[in-house]
Amino acid sequence: MKINQHARLSIAPMMDWTDRHCRYLHRLMSRHSLLYTEMVTAPAVLHGDCERLLGFDPSEQPVALQLGGSDPVQLAQAATIAADYGYAEINLNCGCPSDRVQSGSFGAILMEDPALVARCCDAMIAAVDVPVTIKCRIGVDDQNPHEVLPDFLARVSAAGVDRFSIHARKAWLQGLSPKENRDIPPLDYDLVLAMKGLFPHLHLSVNGGIATLDAATEFLAKGMDGVMIGRAAYHTPAAILLQADGRIFDDPLDRTVEDVVALMLPYIAQHIQRGGKLNQITRHMLGLFQGRPGARGWRRYLSENAHKEGAGPEVVEQALQQITSIAA
């Protein structure tokens, strides 16, 4: 399957959430969905601990690295390093509204400078053989999205980018926090859908406020090439991902949530043997049983015990009893 096909359903890059442990868990629930890293800045890749920042388990594939930056030379160098690590895609962040990102002149503020984005993408495309893609907003601050978004897509695609994930909200760089920017600006799905009509040759995914597979399949039926789901896939991963292979990719996965927990145990044991902590993994597993009897007990047991010294896979097995004892 080509990566554009995997991108029919993708899990959004989310800071402090979509780390390697989260992605390993998500891959156990969907073999085909495209997974993204947290955003990593190009300077961090060039000057930091690459193994810590970029390392991943091969079983996570297909997995894409999201880069932050606005310097074409730095981005090309960082993309080259990432490609050598084996990432299937390099994604440039043009959507994050945080103050820290703005001060570095990247993220959503790049919506104001599509020419610079085009230069950045041109440099990365020249440096690597894997696809270079964009995640963006429909505009920022007082921009008119109906003018800004098509201009942005036209200019950046002219540099060779043919896949965009579009968060269907503006980002307000002044006056709203990053959290508020995920909820307060109104969604404009119609504008994103209209972009598919204007740019039929581009692969366009819609992102923002999509919480169910039913909603995802509706967007695909309306002509979108892909759907990117964020917080819902993190907070209720089984509800999104366990059915995704069958409903989105026509290749059902015969696996239960209990199966997923069992498959996580060897990974957890290995992580602890390497000096890791149990709660570094289990914090991503809290929502696995959301909506099922015993879910609260599962969350409570993990929350109260996974951080303790010496906690290992047995804590997860004991938490699972909160579910199985009810089902028995």
Image: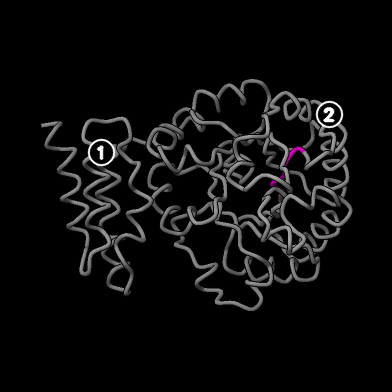
Residue drawn at x 50%, y 31% as measured from the top left:
211
Horizontal placement of 40 versus 238: left or right? right
Residue drawn at x 82%, y 37% as measured from the top left:
149
Disc 1 residue crowd, few under 14, some 14–19, many 20+, Cα 10 Å: some
Residue drawn at x 10%, y 32% as measured from the top left:
328
Give how far across and how far down residue 312 sits, in percent.
22, 63
Give how far across and how far down residue 316 sits, in percent.
22, 53
C-alpha span from label 2 to label 1: 47 Å
Choose mark 2 or mark 1, whichever is in front.
1
Dot 2 and dot 1 residues touching (CB under 8 Å) = no
The residue closer to the viewer here, 209 or 161, is 209
Q: Which residues are magenta?
A: 134-138
Q: Which residue is label 1 attached to?
A: 296
Tag 2: amino acid: Leu
Residue drawn at x 27%, y 47% as measured from the top left:
261
Local secondary structure at mark 1 = helix
Rendering quarter of residue 107: bottom right
Rendering quarter of residue 143: top right
User: Is residue 170 within the magenta segment?
Assistant: no
Give how far across and how far down residue 284 sits, in percent.
38, 51
Give how far across and how far down residue 146 sits, in percent.
84, 30
Q: Which residue is label 2 attached to?
A: 198
